[in-house]
Amino acid sequence: MQAFFGFGGGGKVDDAKSYICVDCGWIYDAGKFSEAPGSFKCPVCQSPKRRFKPYAGKVSGRPKNDSRSMDARYKAKEW
């Protein structure tokens, strides 16, 4: 029951969120962020995993990672 409701059971709450690169605005969308290897780098700007923060905006479906959308998120500092 604990896992069904999302509390207890050792699950990570942060994995339910999307993560954004604070250096360029690219949103990670390849599954659970905690499962990405420690050597993961942003495919756009090569920033390390530690430069990603939980994304404050809403993502429905796949995030738009085109240059215009990324630039708007970066300028708005949506993290």
Image (tube, helix red, strand yellow):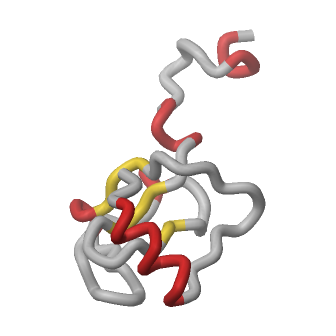
The percent coordinates of residue 6 (x first, y second) are 64, 21
The percent coordinates of residue 71 (x first, y second) are 42, 80
The percent coordinates of residue 28 (x first, y second) are 50, 67
In this orientation, which residue lies closer to the viewer: 75 or 28? 75
- Residue 67, relative to residue 19: is it above or below? below
In-image side of 60 versus 76 (left or right): right
The count of marks equals: 0
Question: What residue lies at 43% left-to-right and 63% top-to-bottom?
Answer: 36
In-image side of 62 versus 23 (left or right): right
Question: What residue lies at 59% left-to-right and 66% top-to-bottom?
Answer: 29
In this orientation, which residue lies closer to the viewer: 65 or 35? 65
In this orientation, which residue lies closer to the viewer: 68 or 27? 68
The percent coordinates of residue 16 (x first, y second) are 58, 41
Quadrant of res 43: bottom left
- Residue 38, relative to residue 17: is it above or below? below
In-image side of 18 versus 78 (left or right): right
Question: What residue lies at 54% left-to-right and 50% top-to-bottom?
Answer: 57
Question: What residue lies at 54% left-to-right and 45% top-to-bottom?
Answer: 17
Q: Quadrant of the N terminus?
A: top right
- Residue 4, relative to residue 51: is it above or below? above
